[in-house]
Amino acid sequence: MTDWNAATWRASFLAVGGTLTLHDGELIAGWRLDNPEQDRAAADVFREIYDNPARFAIVRKMVEAVDRIYPNADAFDATAWLRSLAAIGGGYALGAGRLWLIVHECDWIALGDVMRPLIGHPERVEAVRATVAALQLHEAEAPS
């Protein structure tokens, strides 16, 4: 039996559609998938930490470390975030006031990393929407 590795576990969980966020200091692990096979896969991967407080704490610290990178909306750079999305093959558009993220060509593990700063932060999503609106109106330079 090999040693458990938190980074490998996290990559496996994200690869099957899992999400990891913090809410009021608590780790929230979830998945909402339309495919029952993927749903079972996410549940199976999650079981590796579910009844193991030490592993759960390690994963929580990993998620907390990511949240420290963008601790508030003022520190969040929507243009840099759009560049990150574009760097992994993603795109974006604004239509009828809605923000559309095009992600079908993205590596799913990389996409999880890019999306993490937005999860649970509606002010950041709004900052991205406003930036895309400005880009579409030629009020700002497009991310390169």
Image (cartoon, rainbow, N blue to C red):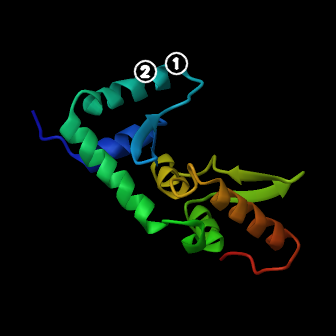
Q: Which mark is residue 19?
A: none
Q: Please give left or right for residue 85 compared with residue 62 in the image.
A: right
The residue located at (60%, 59%) in the rendering is 89
Snapshot quadrant of residue 56: top left
Q: Position of residue 95 (x, y in %)?
A: 86, 53
Snapshot quadrant of residue 81: bottom right
Q: Please give left or right for residue 71 compared with residue 125 in the image.
A: left
The residue located at (22%, 40%) in the rendering is 55
Quarter of the picture holding the C terminus: bottom right
Position above or below: 2 against 106:
above
- In this view, the residue in front, 71 or 135, is 71
Q: Position of residue 42 (x, y in %)?
A: 42, 29
Q: Amino acid at mark 1?
A: Pro
- Residue behind mark 1: 36
Question: Could you classify mark 1 by the number of other residues whose Cα lies within 10 Å: few (under 14), some (14-19), or many (20 or more)?
Answer: few
| Disc 2 from disc 1: Cα separation | 6 Å
Position above or below: 75 against 18:
below
Q: Amino acid at mark 2?
A: Arg
Do callouts 2 and 1 mark residues in contact (Cβ within 8 Å)?
yes
Question: Which residue is outermost to the front?
Answer: 24
The residue located at (30%, 26%) in the rendering is 47
Q: Which mark is residue 40?
A: 2
- In this view, the residue in front, 100 or 72, is 72
> Dot 1: what SS?
helix
Q: Position of residue 10 (x, y in %)?
A: 34, 45
Q: Position of residue 5 (x, y in %)?
A: 21, 46
Question: Could you classify mark 2 by the number of other residues whose Cα lies within 10 Å: few (under 14), some (14-19), or many (20 or more)?
Answer: few
